[in-house]
């Protein structure tokens, strides 16, 4: 039975590894840009006494995308804060079953979050323009365009989609570990707390 689950696990594990590695690289660049944007605002506000209108919103935009791309990796590697007193006190098999139930419940919550996130991002709220962020197309002879809020909201939608993919992977890992505890699982890096280790 565990052999039937191994191929889907290997596939989703490889896809998650590739996407989350790319996301981690984008996330650290977003963090670096966010720090630069904040330092620019501090310089203009306190040294030149002339606060710029866009850095606060740009920093928020970058922070949301950083979080949206790094949170699924943290979930996969067990980086979230976890209260694990009960699972550690239970017998190993019961603890794995409890983890499986919690992961399935997480899956249901994430599916609902994707539906709500899609409606919010692509619906009415996403049609509004940012109050201060513009694409400076006038630098290239065009006309400046305000950034739509959907590009900010999209970070949370991407986050819950990636978290769902990670949760499915953790469910497969837990199932394989329940059926055959000695079966080798693909390494995902970091310390695994959620799911099978």
Image (cartoon, rainbow, N blue to C red):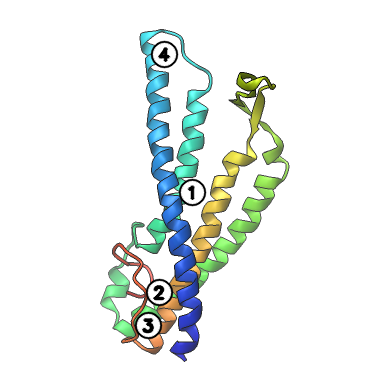
Q: Which mark is residue 46?
A: none
Q: Nearer the viewer, residue 144 or 2?
A: 144
The quarter holding residue 147 reads top right
Report, in whole angstroms, how far the alpha carbon at label 4 lies from the one at label 1.
Answer: 29 Å
Could you tell me which residue is drawn at 53 percent across and 67 percent down? 107
Report, in whole angstroms, how far the alpha carbon at label 1 lies from the one at label 3.
Answer: 29 Å
Please say if the residues under marks 4 and 2 sit with CB atoms less than 8 Å apart. Answer: no
Q: Which residue is mark 4?
A: 44
Residue 1, compared with residue 28, is above or below; it is below
Please say if the residues under marks 4 and 3 sit with CB atoms less than 8 Å apart. Answer: no
Q: Which residue is mark 3?
A: 177
Could you tell me which residue is drawn at 59 percent across and 43 percent down? 153
Q: Position of residue 99 (x, y in %)?
A: 40, 74
In the displayed structure, does residue 25 sit left or right of residue 138?
A: left
User: Farthest residue toward the top?
Assistant: 49
Task: Name the secondary structure under disc 3.
Answer: helix
Report, in whole angstroms, how far the alpha carbon at label 2 lies from the one at label 3.
Answer: 11 Å
Q: Is residue 102 visible?
A: no
Q: Which residue is mark 1?
A: 68
Front disc: 2 or 3: 3
Front disc: 1 or 2: 1
Could you tell me which residue is drawn at 41 percent across and 13 percent down? 45
Bin the neighbour count of mark 3 within 10 Å (Cα to Cα): few under 14, some 14-19, many 20 and up: many
Q: Which residue is mark 2?
A: 99
Q: Position of residue 2 (x, y in %)?
A: 44, 88
Task: Name the secondary structure under disc 1.
Answer: helix
């Amino acid at each position: 039975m565990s052999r039937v689950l191994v191929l889907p696990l290997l596939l989703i594990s490889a896809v998650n590894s590739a996407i989350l590695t790319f996301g981690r690289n984008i996330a650290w660049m977003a963090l670096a840009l966010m720090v630069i944007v904040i330092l620019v605002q501090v310089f203009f506000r306190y040294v030149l006494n002339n606060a710029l209108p866009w850095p606060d919103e740009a920093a928020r935009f970058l922070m949301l995308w950083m979080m949206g791309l790094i949170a699924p990796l943290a979930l996969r590697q067990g980086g979230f804060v976890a209260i694990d007193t009960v699972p550690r006190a239970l017998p190993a098999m019961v603890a794995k079953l409890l983890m499986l139930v919690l992961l399935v419940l997480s899956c249901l919550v994430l599916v609902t979050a994707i539906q709500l996130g899609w409606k919010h991002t692509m619906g009415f709220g996403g049609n509004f323009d940012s109050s201060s962020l513009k694409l400076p197309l006038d630098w290239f002879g065009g006309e400046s365009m305000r950034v739509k809020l959907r590009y900010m909201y999209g970070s949370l939608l991407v986050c819950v989609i990636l978290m769902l993919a990670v949760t499915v992977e953790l469910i497969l890992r837990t199932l394989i570990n329940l059926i055959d505890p000695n079966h080798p699982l693909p390494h995902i890096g970091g310390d695994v707390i959620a799911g099978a280790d």
